[in-house]
Amino acid sequence: MSRVRFNLKQKLNIYILSAATLIYCAAIGYISYRQKNITYTKSVEIVKGSTREYRNKISDELNSMMETARTMRNIFADHPKYAPEHRDALFDQILYSNPEKNPEILSIGLYWEIRALDPTYKKKNGRIRNICYRADNQMKMQKEVVDTTNNEIKGIYYSRYRD
């Protein structure tokens, strides 16, 4: 077998290039590793900041809507003060005007147990349902009297919200 003999210049070039290649590989590996960690940390910070921002926006919107709901609850809680003919007209106007003035509200409903409005009502069940909603770029009102039976009705409303 023949041995290749390198002269001094070639030997120096091989040793220097090998050492330089190792140093460059180690430096590039270290820089890549550090850059990956920095990028990951900054990405997590950006996502957390964005999540916090949207959480606050959603929370503000929900708080605004809950305040509207509480205000309406307080208005409707005074129903015994009004005569029935005035009460119905007033409450219909409130239902209609609220989503009209607040474009983010798509619909709003008012449910009354008939017994709450008419103490002489003797059936076990009965509700008045007034719903105001957006359809075809206009406000519409739907009024119904439902569940006017004397039967035992099963359902979430009757199992949770009964006396």
Image (cartoon, rainbow, N blue to C red):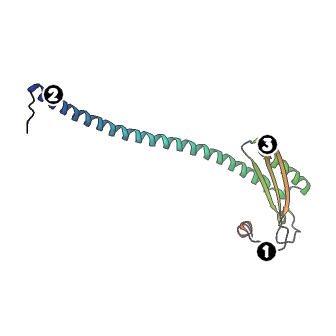
SS category of the residue bearing label 2: helix
Query: Residue 18, located in which quarter of the rendered image?
Result: top left
Q: Relative to 17, does residue 76 appear above or below in the rendering?
A: below
Residue 100: percent from the left, percent from the top? 79, 42
**Residue 56, disc:** none
Residue 152: percent from the left, percent from the top? 79, 74
* Residue at the limit of the structure toward the front, as seen here: 1
Q: Nearer the viewer, residue 60 or 25?
A: 25
- Residue 27 located left or right of residue 147: left
Q: CA distance from mark 2 to mark 3?
A: 83 Å
Which residue matches tag 1?
Answer: 152
Q: Relative to 135, does residue 82 appear above or below in the rendering?
A: below
- Residue 57 located left or right of residue 163: left
Q: Earlier in the sequence, mark 2 or mark 3?
A: 2
Three-letter amino acid code at the position of disc 3 = Glu
- Closer to us: mark 1 or mark 2? 2
Q: Nearer the viewer, residue 17 or 135?
A: 17
Seen at 22% across and 33% down, the residue is 21
Q: Relative to 84, does residue 42 appear above or below in the rendering?
A: above
Q: Nearer the viewer, residue 36 or 119?
A: 36
Seen at 16% across and 31% down, the residue is 14
- Closer to us: mark 2 or mark 3? 2
Residue neighbourhood size for the residue with mark 2, other residues' Cα within 10 Å, grouped as few (<14), some (14–19), many (≥20)? few
Which residue matches tag 2?
Answer: 13
Q: Earlier in the sequence, mark 1 or mark 3?
A: 3
Three-letter amino acid code at the position of disc 1 = Glu
Discs 1, 2 touching: Cβ within 8 Å: no
SS category of the residue bearing label 3: helix
Which residue matches tag 3?
Answer: 100
